[in-house]
Image (tube, rainbow, N blue to C red):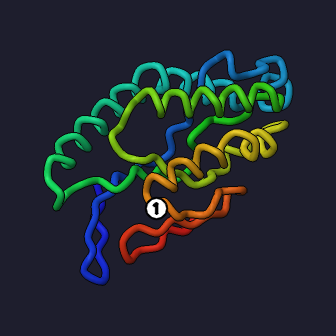
Amino acid sequence: LARAAGGGDAFSFVLLGALHFDRPEHHDMAWVKQDKPNDVRQIEGYCRNTREVTPLLFATVRATIATLNQSPATRVAFVLQVGDLVEGLCGSEALAVRQNQESLAFVRAAQLGAPFLFTKGNHDITGPGAVAAFGHVFPPFLTEQSRRVAPSAAAVTSARYTVGCGHAQFVF
């Protein structure tokens, strides 16, 4: 949990680190084993975390936001995730699109109680087709979420965007 203030406005936001959302079906494992053999165990670990840890983390975040939102003084303006939303290393654009879409479906289903903003991390654009998949899947979601924070926010068209909140400007 973080608080920001400036010009008399104060607000809270929840800060999340790298999530590396991942599932086995997101990968062409033949490609991974051939081109990225040292990453096989990493993928297995992130898949386990996505299955066992991430749901518990999001439940805790949801409960924390619900508690904080009971008071206008501590209302959570948004959740800010600092990159590496997904693991990447899928092996094709189609698989990267699937991983990105499923990560957003997970975020939406979590119903955190606040908009979810994130910045691009290296894993979000790692592997064949990952850059294109990022550009197809994430900007519409980020536009929607940004406009929940600031209704007049510009459409997000790339990994570079800004969101104003109170007297603060967040640059991604």
Say if 24 sits above or below 14 in the image. above
Name the outermost residue toward the bottom: 7
What's the amino acid at mark 1? Answer: Ala
**Which of 18 and 81 lies nearest the eye of the viewer?**
81
Relative to residue 121, is residue 35 drawn left or right? right
Occupied quadrant, residue 58: top left
Secondary-structure class at tag 1: loop
Q: Is residue 50 left or right of residue 111?
A: right
Residue at left offset 47%, top offset 19%: 51
Q: The C terminus is located in which quarter?
A: bottom right
Q: Nearer the viewer, residue 42 or 12?
A: 12
Q: In x, y percent, where is residue 168?
A: 41, 74
**Relative to 43, residue 19 above or below:** below
Residue at (16% x, 61% y) in the render: 73
Q: Residue at x 81, y 43 (%)?
A: 132
**Mark 1 = which residue?**
150
Q: Is residue 149 left or right of residue 138?
A: left
Q: Quadrant of the N terminus?
A: bottom left
Image coordinates of residue 52 in percent, x first then y, are: 41, 20
Q: Residue at x 27, y 74 (%)?
A: 9
Q: Position of residue 38 (x, y in %)?
A: 72, 31
Q: Outermost residue toward the front?
A: 152
Label 1 crowd bin: few (<14), some (14–19), many (20+), radius 10 Å: some
Question: How far across and how far down the image is residue 160, in percent?
Answer: 66, 63
Q: Name the image quarter holding residue 53.
A: top left
